[in-house]
Image (tube, rainbow, N blue to C red):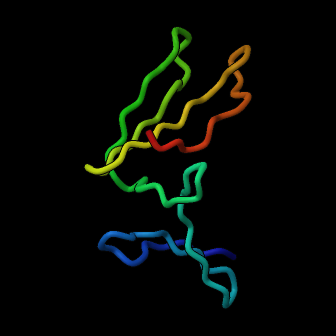
Amino acid sequence: MAEVYGGGGGSDPALIARVGGLEMAIQDRDTAGNIVPTWKAHSYTYDNSGNLSTDTVTDGSGTWVRTYMWSNGAQTSDSGWVKQ
């Protein structure tokens, strides 16, 4: 059974997953491989059908946007986090 709990705090509050005796950090990364501060506030936009269109997170020095694509009410893909 997996156990997930809050991590280090400070500037790197990663979630930690423990499976058996193995622990690993869970962090979102952008398309360039950098950590995305997903613990910060988000803003969202929606398309005319009410589907999530973008998720934006800002940490005061950087902004990352994730764009979602939809077809017939089903999510078909997303851009991954892209630093602006």
Give x and y (percent) for residue 70.
67, 21
Q: Is residue 2 above or below residue 51?
A: below
Q: Position of residue 12 (x, y in %)?
A: 39, 70
Total number of numbered discs in the rendering: 0
8 vs 26, left or right, is left
Q: Is residue 75 left or right of residue 4?
A: right
Which quadrant holds residue 24? bottom right
Q: Residue furthest top?
A: 48
Residue 48, percent from left and from top? 52, 9
Placement of the C terminus among the 4 image quadrants: top left
Q: Image quadrant for the N terminus?
A: bottom right
Q: Is residue 5 above or below residue 27?
A: below
Extreme residue in the left direction: 60
Vertical arrangement, residue 70 with respect to residue 17, above or below: above
**Whole-percent x and y of residue 28?**
54, 57
Residue appearing at x 65%, y 35% in the figure: 78
Residue at horizontal 52%, vertical 59%? Answer: 34
Q: Which residue is depicted at the point 67% across and 90% down?
A: 21
Relative to the observer, which residue lies in front, 13 or 58? Answer: 58
Instruction: Choose between 7 and 79: the one closer to the eye.
Output: 79
